[in-house]
Image (tube, grey):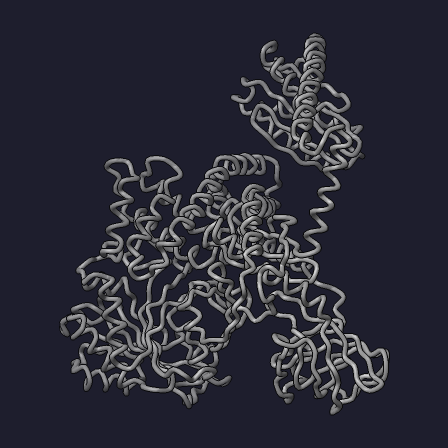
């Protein structure tokens, strides 16, 4: 039976048993920050298990899962995967053990046709009910029903004895194997029936649940008679393509298995919005790609850089179950290739550099300090240069050292702490969380802001200085909560509205609007009179500011869609700010967006603005929105009913924000900047409307000023700039040649009286503004005129100093490397530097060392020469 057939058969079977079949949830959990990736079928059903949602009693799914706990075992065993599919059926307070066991047995014996004599089951040792049901419902003899302990057959594992507290229960597993106690586990049925208390007692849950999981790949292997999951049909096609990338005769099955697994995992993770980076989900993807590259090399790859070539094979195999893989194939291949190339460069440059530093560390560090300094070096190469920890530990091991994992983890935590400190927002007068418990008894605020900017409303509550109050007096500031409001509360990146509240002998200025769960809080400063609960007031939004915000919000939707059309559908929002004066849009992308592409994006957005397309805003079910192809913005929480904002055929987003009537009201869109905010995430800042027009006018004025300075018309500026650039280049060339001639003459002069240390000429030259290019000329001259030499060039600038170390090829072969010398000097002068074995550059900004630079350089070089 093919894997696709098994998947469909399972879902059809449980649909016939009254289950609602759900599509696989994203690998990136929605609204669950506790999880990096979806690792089980039950994840998307948490609201049902917790009783928060009750519209479905029975569910079934085939869930994409990603787990990395056993990554080092993938490929080496027959059944371990990082990416896999989990078939599951679930009951939320509906059926329980009897039906779960009966249907489970019916499916494996009748639908899958597995003979009873090749199956056995396990139950929790104290679960007599399940033991009896397997005998009665399945007709299994007691010899094929094994009682096992809480570690194997209680969920969470051994929770009865060790916790955690909360929902738990016994489980029962179905195994394929003729001999009880041996074989392959294909299905786990969890009977969630208890609530563990602090004292370890198990209380019966009022709502008992069923949570099952059948490994798709494992079960397919049993049905196809394969010893390994990696030999089933979906892997066979990928392996066939993989073999074309390997040297003839290569036979490294474990490495090939790992390549296929890691590539599948990376393709699906990227397809769901994760991109390679140095933290969180991004680091998992980066690790999968880089480990996949390593395994491919060990498997006998024809050359480096072939890992991404397998993406089409994965997409072809998986598209019948996940049609979206076809549209995401190109983006996944591009991202993986980019990461693969970056990894190749890192290995080429950073790994040898680390190896050299470790050797130097072993020579110089005191034994007691060696572990600490090795950990610090490891962290630097991991955090600064992006070298994978696996490569770092291998490099340490090769040099007889082990990584102090505890110290490494401490350094990682300290780095995260510094990052958090840098990102703290200070100066908040009110903390929103502090008010949450104060509004629990207030009814939800009716939001009128989609249609109205002004209304009358009754004041229900006043929040001031962390307490509920009935009044807010002149000169005081606090939050006012009404029964209804036209003010939009900050959400989804859109800032809160401002405006004013008036009444009889009363006036307050609204400076911000925030959500407190169901209530809209108006941060207000009373300028006249006092606000009193129970009175009616007039609420008026600052419409001009709101209009500017709406221009930027509608433009944000256009920008998002334009980026997806031009860069690819891997682009997903990672955050945003929609303010009256600007918009900021963060999105997933793996490299900088060049100016030409930014121009295309800007032009596409402005084209949609010129079309003056009407916006359609409708409320519908989440399912209907998904069927229409609406995409969700980052960070939003969506209920069963969602608001969909559609802009012709160009954009369709789930969004609760305020928007214009048509795109023409934006007037103009102008990108101001594009930058990186972290690995794999880019940021675009832009302006619209009159601010965009003002920016263009300022640009026009600057062009006029430049044209005047060059005594030409604006149209002639490009030619004049080119002429000027050519003249500067020619003059610089002449200057370099003149200066280089002086440097070469100086080299000849210095060679005549430079000290000779053990047959090596030590040449030293210091001069103001002596840059690396001129030092390179001196280096080349010495190579042609001297035997073994070391040259030390140093120079002073206004706010820094620089130095260059140049080494002859003969000395490089003897082990003297310019890069090592430069780094050692850097330690002495609080500087930095590096380079190639024969030519390296360093520098520093602590001018205290400027006068001693030559002496320090000579001391280090002479010591190095003495140790050869």
Report whether residue 794 is seen: yes
Q: Nearer the viewer, residue 218 or 818?
A: 218
Seen in the picture, residue 8 relative to 327 is either above or below; the reply is: below
Seen in the picture, residue 298 relative to 801 is either above or below; the reply is: below
Report whether residue 575 is seen: no
Q: Position of residue 786 (x, y in %)?
A: 61, 11
Seen in the picture, residue 191 relative to 717 is either above or below; the reply is: below
Q: Nearer the viewer, residue 235 or 687?
A: 687
Q: Nearer the viewer, residue 768 or 750?
A: 768
Q: Residue at x 64, y 17 (%)?
A: 777
Q: Is 317 on the left-hand or right-hand side of 785?
A: left
Q: Position of residue 95 (x, y in %)?
A: 31, 86
Q: Quadrant of the N terminus?
A: bottom left
Q: Residue at x 61, y 39 (%)?
A: 365
Picture quadrant where residue 497 is located: bottom right
Q: Nearer the viewer, residue 546 or 775?
A: 546
Q: Is 360 on the left-hand or right-hand side of 332?
A: right
Picture quadrant where residue 478 is located: bottom right
Q: Residue at x 67, y 25 (%)?
A: 725
Picture quadrant where residue 340 is located: top left
Q: Is 648 on the left-hand or right-hand side of 818?
A: left
Q: Position of residue 850 (x, y in %)?
A: 78, 30
């Amino acid at each position: 039976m093919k894997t696709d057939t098994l998947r469909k058969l399972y879902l059809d079977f449980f649909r016939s048993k009254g289950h609602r079949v759900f599509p696989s949830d994203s690998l990136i959990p929605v609204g669950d920050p506790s999880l990096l990736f979806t690792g089980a079928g039950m994840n998307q059903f948490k609201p049902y298990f917790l009783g928060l949602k009750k519209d479905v009693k029975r569910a079934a799914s085939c869930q994409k899962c990603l787990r990395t706990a056993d990554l080092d075992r993938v490929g080496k065993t027959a059944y371990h995967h990082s990416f896999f599919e989990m078939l599951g059926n679930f009951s939320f307070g509906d059926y329980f053990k009897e039906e779960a066991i009966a249907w489970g047995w019916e499916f494996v014996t009748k639908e899958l046709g597995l003979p009873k004599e090749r199956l056995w089951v396990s139950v929790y040792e104290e679960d007599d009910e399940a033991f009896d049901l397997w005998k009665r419902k399945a007709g299994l003899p007691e010899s094929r029903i094994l009682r096992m302990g809480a570690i194997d057959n209680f969920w969470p594992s051994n929770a009865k004895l060790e916790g955690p507290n909360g929902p738990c229960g016994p489980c029962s597993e179905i195994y394929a194997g003729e001999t009880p106690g041996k074989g392959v586990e294909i299905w786990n049925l969890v009977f969630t029936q208890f609530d563990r208390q602090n004292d370890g007692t198990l209380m019966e849950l009022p709502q008992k649940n069923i949570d099952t999981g059948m490994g798709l790949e494992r079960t397919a292997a049993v049905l196809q008679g394969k010893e390994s999951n990696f030999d089933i049909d979906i892997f066979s096609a990928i392996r066939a393509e993989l073999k074309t990338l390997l040297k003839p005769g290569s036979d490294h099955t474990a490495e090939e298995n790992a390549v296929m697994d890691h590539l599948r995992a990376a393709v699906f993770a990227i397809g769901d919005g994760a991109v390679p980076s140095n933290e969180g989900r991004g680091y998992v993807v980066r690790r999968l790609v880089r480990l996949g590259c390593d395994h491919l090399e060990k498997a006998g790859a024809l050359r480096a850089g072939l890992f991404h070539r397998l993406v089409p094979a994965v997409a072809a195999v998986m598209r019948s179950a996940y049609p979206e893989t076809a549209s995401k194939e190109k983006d996944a291949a591009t991202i993986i290739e980019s990461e693969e190339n970056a990894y190749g460069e890192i290995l080429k440059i950073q790994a040898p550099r680390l190896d050299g530093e470790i050797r130097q560390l072993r020579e110089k560090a005191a034994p007691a300090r060696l572990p600490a300094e090795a950990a610090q070096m490891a962290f630097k190469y991991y955090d600064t240069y992006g070298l994978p920890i696996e490569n770092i530990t291998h490099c340490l091991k090769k040099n007889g050292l082990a990584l102090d994992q505890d110290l490494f983890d401490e350094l990682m935590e300290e780095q995260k702490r510094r990052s958090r400190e840098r990102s703290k927002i200070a100066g908040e007068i009110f903390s929103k969380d502090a008010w949450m418990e104060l509004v629990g008894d207030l009814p939800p605020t009716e939001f009128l802001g989609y249609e109205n900017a002004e209304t009358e409303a009754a004041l229900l509550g006043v929040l001031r200085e962390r307490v509920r109050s009935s009044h807010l007096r002149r000169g005081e500031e606090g939050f006012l909560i009404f029964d209804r409001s036209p003010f939009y509360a900050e959400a989804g990146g859109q800032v809160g509205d401002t405006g004013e509240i008036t009444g009889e002998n009363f006036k307050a200025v609204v400076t911000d609007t925030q959500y407190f769960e169901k209530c809209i809080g108006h941060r207000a400063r009373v300028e006249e009179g006092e606000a009193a609960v129970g009175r009616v007031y007039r609420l008026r939004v600052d419409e001009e500011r709101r209009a500017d915000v709406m221009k930027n919000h509608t433009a944000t939707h256009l920008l998002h869609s334009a980026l997806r059309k031009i860069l690819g559908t891997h682009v997903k929002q990672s955050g945003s700010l929609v303010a009256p004066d600007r918009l900021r849009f963060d999105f997933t992308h793996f490299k900088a967006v060049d100016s030409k592409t930014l121009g295309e994006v800007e032009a596409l957005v402005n084209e949609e603005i010129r079309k003056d397309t009407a916006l359609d805003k409708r409320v519908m079910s989440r399912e209907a929105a998904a069927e229409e192809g609406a995409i969700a913005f980052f960070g939003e929480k969506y209920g069963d009913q969602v608001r969909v904002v559609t802009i012709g055929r160009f954009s369709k987003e789930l969004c609760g924000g305020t928007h214009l009537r048509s795109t023409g009201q934006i007037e103009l869109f102008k990108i101001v900047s594009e930058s990186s905010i972290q690995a794999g995430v880019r940021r675009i800042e832009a302006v619209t409307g009159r601010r965009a027009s003002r920016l263009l006018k300022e640009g026009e004025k600057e062009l006029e000023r430049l044209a005047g300075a060059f005594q030409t018309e604006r149209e002639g500026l490009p030619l004049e700039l080119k002429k000027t650039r050519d003249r500067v280049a020619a003059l610089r060339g002449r200057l370099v040649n003149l200066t280089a001639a002086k440097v070469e003459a100086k080299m000849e002069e210095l060679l005549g009286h430079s000290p000779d240390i053990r047959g090596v000429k030590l040449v030293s030259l210091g001069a103001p503004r002596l840059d690396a290019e001129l030092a390179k000329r001196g280096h080349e001259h010495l190579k042609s005129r001297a035997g073994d030499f070391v040259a030390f060039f140093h120079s002073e600038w206004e706010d820094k100093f620089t130095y260059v170390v140049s080494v002859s090829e003969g000395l490089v072969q003897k082990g003297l490397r310019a890069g090592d010398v430069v780094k050692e000097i850097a330690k002495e002068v609080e500087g930095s530097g590096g380079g190639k074995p024969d030519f390296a550059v360093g520098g520093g900004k602590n001018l205290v060392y400027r006068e001693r630079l030559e002496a320090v350089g000579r001391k280090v070089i002479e010591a190095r020469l003495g140790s050869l």
